[in-house]
Each structure stands twice: as structure tokens, then as C-alpha cells.
Image (spheres, grey):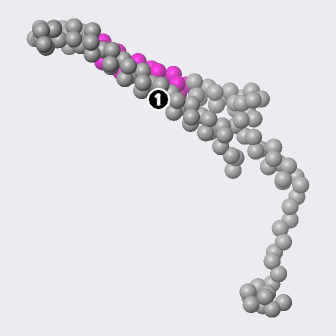
Amino acid sequence: MAAAQLRGSGPAARTRVVLAEVSGRRQRAGGARTELTQQTRVGETLIRGLVRAQLALALQLSAVVLVGLGGLPWLFAIAPSVGRMTVLGVNLPWLLLAVLSFPFLVAVGWTYVRLAERNEQDFTDLVQRPER
């Protein structure tokens, strides 16, 4: 009794736990993972979102390759003097298309793999995130 008087309050309030609330939490705990395994509409939507993100990434990087390599012939047509330049005895168009295009394509490929893995990791984090 002395401790209750020192704190200045009465007995602690009791919390009532109802079994329906506890079982409802347990069923929702699976969340997105359950939706995926049961192949529900929500799970299909999650998968469709991942596929769309991967497709958008592929299209964006394809555009980069198209502009980067496909734009070179346009550059040489618009500015013929650039097409006639030589670097170390090699014509610039040959140097750009035959030598420098490969590191460019490797860099684009590396970027695609890194960003695609990030999309997949974000998807995995979304699926494994605990429900609130």
C-alpha cells in the first residue's frame, strides 16, 4: 500500500486479452508471403509489379544502348568531319564501334544486373516485412 501511495496512483489498469484478437493476429502474420504461396490476386499483383519493374529497367537500359550506339551513325552523318578523324592511326568510327562499344555494353550489362538484383531484393524485403 505504501508503494501505491508513493507513486500517486491506484492499482495498475488491467488489460483484457480476447482469444479472437490473438488468433486474428496469427492469421495475418504471413501477409504477402501467404498471398504469394496461395496464389491469390494480391500475390499475382505483387509478382506483376516485380515483372513490370524488371521490364521497365530493361527498356530503359535498352534505350541507353540504342541512343549510345545507334546515335553514332547519326553523329557521323551529321558531322562528317568527326567520321574522318583518326586516333592513333585508326579511324574514329572504327575505334568507337569496334573497340569502345564492348566496355560500354559490359557497363550497361553490369548496371542492369545490379539494378535488377536491387529490384528483387526490394521485392523480397516487401514479402518478408512483418505486418503491422
User: Is the stretch drawn in magenta largely helix, strand or loop?
Assistant: helix
Q: Amino acid at mark 1?
A: Arg
Residue 35 seen by the camera: yes
Q: Residue furthest front?
A: 88
The answer to which image quadrant residue 81 occupies is: top left
Query: Does 121 sit above or below residue 60?
Result: below
Considering depth in this image, is 17 or 88 the residue closer to the camera?
Answer: 88
Q: Residue furthest right?
A: 19
Q: Residue at x 36, y 17 (%)?
A: 105
Q: Position of residue 23 (x, y in %)?
A: 85, 49
Residue range highlighted in magenta: 52-70
How many numbered circles are shown?
1
Considering depth in this image, is 50 or 111 the residue closer to the camera?
Answer: 111
57 vs 124, left or right, is: left
Q: Position of residue 89 (x, y in %)?
A: 12, 9
Residue underneath mark 1: 114
Query: Does 126 sit above or below residue 93?
Result: below
- Residue 43 lies in magenta, yes or no? no
Considering depth in this image, is 115 or 22 the residue closer to the camera?
Answer: 115
Q: Residue at x 46, y 21 (%)?
A: 58
Considering depth in this image, is 18 or 93 the residue closer to the camera?
Answer: 93
Q: Residue at x 81, y 47 (%)?
A: 26
Q: Quadrant of the N terminus?
A: bottom right
The answer to which image quadrant residue 75 occupies is: top left
Q: Residue at x 89, y 55 (%)?
A: 19
- Residue 60 lies in magenta, yes or no? yes
Q: Residues within 10 Å of mark 1 (few under 14, many from 20)?
A: few
